[in-house]
Image (tube, rainbow, N blue to C red):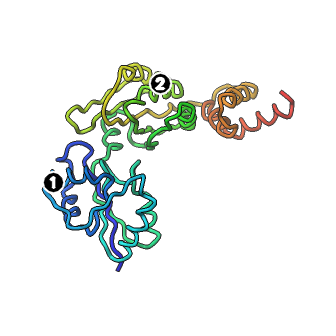
Amino acid sequence: MTGTLVLAGTPIGDIADAPPRLAEELAGADVVAAEDTRRLRRLTQALGVTPKGRVVSYFEGNEAARTPELVEELVSGARVLLVTDAGMPSVSDPGYRLVAAAVEKDVRVTAVPGPSAVLTALALSGLPVDRFCFEGFLPRKAGERLSRLREVAGERRTLVYFEAPHRLDDTLAAMAEVFGAERRAAVCRELTKTYEEVRRGPLGELAAWAAEGVRGEITVVVEGAPERGPEEVDAAELVRRVRVREEAGERRKEAIAAVAAEAGVPKRQVFDAVVAAKNAGA
């Protein structure tokens, strides 16, 4: 009999939010794989539980090397509990690699549902939550960040991002540039903690506020693109927009997709306009 991999959610702030089953799993697992063993120690002390099993670290730096070890334990029949510093494992945290490897070996994978910064921020944002997409962390480099944002400029669903406090002002400024300064958003800071704050408003205003400095764990929720019909844009204008993006460093394929999203026209229409201009020597 193979073992079981258990993904357990941990509090994102208030320790009282720990799911009741978390203490049971911590006490009974054969192996506890933790993103930070020091944080795990504080968590177990707060819950009044002592793990009976072996405690190992499992973080970005050793994830590739440790995954085969844990899979071997699972195949041998062990119950392995995976916890991260806060929230659900594998959501912008270690975990996906281990889950994929366990599934490949037909190991049972289950979860102890727990707090999620993504869902908590969505619920508090005041923005539509019927459809959303989670984008994780944006690239640190300015050019790559702008390129990633342009990819979703026409996305109708609500967008959710994680961000480091020292990069929040640059990120919000980039969002205001790409999405428009009037696009509604919410910055959720220190969720469920003592100094929890949800700042709502247009991206332009939020960028100006963040420029003064912000601390804490940050989740940003951004309203999706408004519904609109196709613009009255002729072929020459479509070509011009593609060229502007290419000159800014975007690849042609990405530029065509972004321009099509902006204008509300099929990508094929933009592609055909670019090819026609090239053939005409324009």
On screen, residue 281 above or below 253: above
Please state, as top left, top right, bottom left or bottom right, where the N terminus lies in the image: bottom left
Q: Nearer the viewer, residue 82 or 113?
A: 82
Direction from residue 59 to residue 51 in the image, left or right? left
Where 257 falls versus 45 (above or below)? Answer: above
Residue 173 numbered tag: 2
Which one is in front in this view, the residue at disc 2 or the one at disc 1? 1
The amino acid pointed to by label 2 is Ala
Do the numbered discs 2 and 1 sit on residues whose CB atoms are within 8 Å? no
- At x 43% / y 73%, what residue is drawn? 106
Residue 175 rendering spot, x and y as whole percentages: 49, 28
- Which residue is the site of mark 1? 47
Specify whether 5 is left or right of 46. Answer: right
Q: Is residue 79 left or right of residue 277?
A: left
Q: Say which element carries label 1.
A: helix
Residue at (31% x, 56% y) in the render = 34
x and y, in percent, of residue 210 in the image: 38, 23
Camera-side residue of 67 and 106: 67
Please indicate whether residue 251 sits to the left or right of residue 215 in the image: right
> In this view, which residue lies farthest toward the right?
280
Circle 1 crowding by C-alpha within 10 Å: few under 14, some 14–19, many from 20: some
Q: Residue at x 57, y 37 (%)?
A: 151
Is residue 166 shown above or below 91?
Answer: above
Mark 2 or mark 1: which comes first in sequence? 1
**Mark 2, residues whose alpha carbon is within 10 Å: few (<14), some, or many (≥20)?**
many
Please state which amino acid type lies under the numbered disc 1. Answer: Leu
Helix, strand or loop at disc 2? helix
Q: CA distance from mark 2 to mark 1?
A: 41 Å
Residue nearest the viewer, comparing 221 with 236: 221
